[in-house]
Amino acid sequence: MSLPSSVCLFGAPHRYYQGPGAFDLLGQVAAPFGPNPLIVADAFVLQMLGDRLAAVCAASGLTPILRPFEGEITYPAIEALIASLSGVVPGIAVGIGGGKSLDAAKAVALKLRLPVVTVPTIASNDSPTSAAIAMYDEHHTMIAVDRLHRSPEAVLVDTALIAKAPLRFLLAGIGDAISKKFEADGCRDGTGVTPFGTRPTLTAIAIADACYATLRRHGSAGVVAAARGEVTPDLEAVIEATLLMSGLGFENGGLSLAHSLTRGLVKVRGTRDAIHGDQIAWALLVQLAAEGRADVFIRELVQFYREIGLPTCLAQLGLHDATPAEVEEIARWTMTAPHLANLAVPIDAALIVAAIRRAEELSEHTDV
Ligand SMILES: [Zn+2]
């Protein structure tokens, strides 16, 4: 739907559930959409949760169509998944697991015009709450970001499961979330639009602010709890910021230079293999440098990253001894991103190169 420029839009999942045991609500949440939900899940998640899933479905009278999902989200893979249904159209698609299974469920939902439920078992980025679907080709290159017609019907976040997942996923989720305040501010202060195609709402700016404040307040203690596999109020706060606030913040507030930099990072040695949220954590430092923020402001954030374990320089993202040509390549690809109007300052490749150098320098010369 295209909207007139005078109209703003705020979109969100219909329901968001969070807490230990939220997984067990799946039957009740899916039941109103018919007896045969399509459930797409990571194979190892099915191993871990298969019995529990069967019990939850049986308790609500559901006979799910189960499809394990491995590999990349490509158009042929989604077509094959739909073909495996042999013409049966489920009433709802449910994705359980990491980003791939959730995106696979979303992609099927988009194609078959179904509502979708996401059940993330890690919190490595905010896609569970968003309408976005990252599509790839067979060479693992992202080729499109498709969008659901409707935001997810429900998001079930079982924090007991997320607390047990490897810590590096939660750290990446914090990296993906911590930039959202600055990206939404960039969108508001620039001339850009949100992924919904409208100017950001005040509500989105407030949520993005709350996302940042929550991560700064609860981040360290939340990470300590996650490292122990314990659900605590600090970890609950961090997960809510990482999944809900971050998702609402970017869809309704807009993305900016930090997310644009991933266009370059996925092209370059080392950084191309870094997890998205780690890329964004570093890219935020570059955005802040490009915006001309004071050294002391950027150094303080670098210290926070060090404290919790987020990367602060290209070497920690996997690009050791970056050459000038590699830095220029990052900048060149960044300039192809659609979010570059979402910044108060006009941007070009030379400014991005200078900002990367400044961020690297500040990282190198900041003590813990
Ligand atoms: Zn992101």
Image (spheres, rainbow, N blue to C red):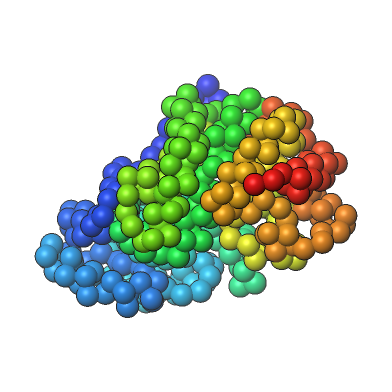
Total number of numbered labels? 0
How far from the left and from the top, in percent, is residue 207? 44, 32
How far from the left and from the top, in percent, is residue 120? 38, 58
Position above or below: 295 against 25: above
For the question of whether residue 9 can be seen, the reply is: no
How far from the left and from the top, in percent, is residue 359? 75, 43
Residue at image location 62% in from the left, 44% down from the top? 303
Residue at image location 59% in from the left, 48% down from the top? 305
Residue at image location 60% in from the left, 50% down from the top? 306
Residue found farthest to the top = 6
Q: Is residue 297 left or right of residue 248?
A: right
How far from the left and from the top, in percent, is residue 204? 47, 31
Q: In front: 191, or 52?
A: 52
For the question of whether residue 55 can be seen, the reply is: yes
Rendered image quadrant of residue 40: bottom left
Rendered image quadrant of residue 255: top right
Residue found farthest to the right = 324
Q: Is residue 161 left or right of residue 140?
A: left
Residue at image location 47% in from the left, 56% down from the top? 170
Rendered image quadrant of residue 195: top right
